[in-house]
Amino acid sequence: MHLVYLAFAIVAEVIGTSALKAADGFTKLVPSLVVVVSYAVAFFLLSLAIRSMSVGIAYAIWAGLGIVLITAIGVVYFGERLDAPAYLGLALIIGGVAVINLFSKTVVH
């Protein structure tokens, strides 16, 4: 169940970060509210996930996948462009998350 909590925490964090761009420095009410609520949900769900998994591993997965997903949203929805080193870095993040999940004995499945 902890992986379900972690997955939804990642989704909530990505929604909040996407809304953060739309909030334009917290000058727009609705996107600002989405930011606050999404981050609150994300941290609550992360707190449930770390009840039964290592906080460092949970945070590494949460942050790594969040970075990759928000970058993809930035490219697709906000027209942001990436160069080759950025793509390489993202591939390394994905690889790191995969290594943790596939080979680390600290991850409880």
Image (cartoon, grey):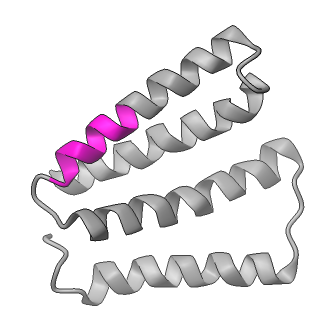
User: Residue most toward the bottom?
Assistant: 103
Count how many numbered circles sit on residues in the image.
Answer: 0
Q: Position of residue 106 (x, y in %)?
A: 17, 79
Q: Is residue 91 left or right of residue 64?
A: right
Residue at the spot 27% in from the left edge and 90% down from the top edge: 103
Q: Is residue 27 left or right of residue 33?
A: right
Residue 47 is one of the magenta-drawn residues: yes
In which quadrant of the rendered image does the C terminus lie?
bottom left
Q: Nearer the viewer, residue 106 or 3?
A: 106
Check the image and report above or below for 88 versus 13. Answer: below
Q: Position of residue 4 (x, y in %)?
A: 25, 49
> Which quarter of the picture shows residue 30?
top right
Check the image and report above or below for 75 versus 90. Answer: above
User: Residue most toward the left?
Assistant: 52
Residue at the spot 46% in from the left edge and 43% down from the top edge: 11
- By secondary structure, the bulk of the magenta-drawn segment is best described as helix
Residue at the spot 29% in from the left edge and 46% down from the top edge: 46
- Region of the chain picked out in magenta, as a range: 41-50
Q: Nearer the viewer, residue 55 or 14?
A: 55
Residue 82 is one of the magenta-drawn residues: no
Check the image and report above or below for 68 versus 41. Answer: below
Q: Is residue 17 left or right of residue 4?
A: right
> Which quarter of the picture shows residue 52?
bottom left
Check the image and report above or below for 81 versus 95. Answer: above
> Which quarter of the picture shows residue 86?
bottom right
Q: Position of residue 24 (x, y in %)?
A: 79, 26
